[in-house]
Image (spheres, rainbow, N blue to C red):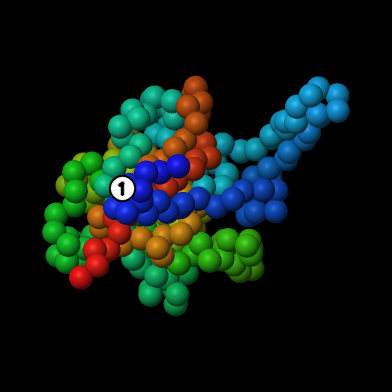
Amino acid sequence: MLSPVFTAACQVIDLSHAYSAAAPHYPGDRPIERRQAGTRARDGFLDYRLDMAEHCGTHLDAPLHFAENGLAVDEIPLTQLMGPLVVIDISARAQHDPDAQIEVSDITGWTNRQGALPSAAILVMRSGWSRRWHDAARYFGSVNGSHHSPGWSLAAITHLIEKTDVVGIGVDTASIDPFIAADFPVHRAWLGAGRWALENLSGLEQLPEQGGWLVAAVARITGATGFPARVFAFVPNQKKP
């Protein structure tokens, strides 16, 4: 249990979807399969075996996912899997444009309002897309065999790589690339620069633009290119007048 002093100072907000075979899975991937392995009657305990993709549900993409010599999940320093949280909100645009992207102007607009980005920050895109999670066709923006959902623009990612020390980015969609992008340009640039990403985040509507602290609690799997994560944020409580 968190101490009363801690809970008086901040909230802990879960940014992860619960994942099951019924949840959306990336086009082309198989849904998660769960098979019972141990039974209480036979073995004295209950457990299951899971068959699932590394990149399913709320998960982390390690640099190795797209960079041949990039870090695997287990090689990312623990101190880089947590940091000050910055929320960039494009939900108004995404409501009318399923191909909306975070542009450089969204980042500079944030800094004009809030000041400089915190050192070693984690930037997440809030598009409102996570509300579609329980309807796979809507979540993937499926129309006549093609898919549409918001993401980061290559220009914005290049700006972050060249101008900032941001360690990670995140999205409340299935991909940091907008689905209309060909050949995963954002993945190639961002992961190729040694940074990491979170996909399929949830609960971002509860977060302020700044002041939070994000933790990506991902299992330390040797050589993994990515893995499901329990992602959460500490957000300071508003002081009463």
- State whether residue 7 is above or below residue 41: below
At x 40%, y 63%, the residue is 206
Q: Is residue 49 left or right of residue 40?
A: left
Q: Position of residue 216 (x, y in %)?
A: 41, 41
At x 72%, y 40%, the residue is 33
At x 56%, y 36%, the residue is 54
Within 10 angstroms of label 1, few (less than 14), some, or many (20 or more) residues? Answer: few
Q: Secondary structure at mark 1?
A: helix
- State whether residue 104 is above or below residue 227: below
Quarter of the image with the N terminus is top left
Q: Position of residue 27 (x, y in %)?
A: 62, 52
* Residue 131 seen from this side: yes
| The one of 215 and 136 positioned closer to us in this rendering | 215
| The one of 180 and 81 positioned closer to us in this rendering | 81
Q: Is residue 218 left or right of residue 90?
A: right
Q: Quadrant of residue 194?
A: top left
Q: Position of residue 165 (x, y in %)?
A: 21, 41
Task: Say what amino acid the circle numbered 1 marks.
Answer: Val
What residue is disc 1 on? Answer: 5
| The one of 186 and 38 positioned closer to us in this rendering | 38
At x 33%, y 39%, the residue is 82
Q: Is residue 16 left or right of residue 20?
A: left
Outermost residue toward the right in this view: 41
Quarter of the image with the C terminus is bottom left
Outermost residue toward the front in this view: 4
| The one of 182 and 99 positioned closer to us in this rendering | 99
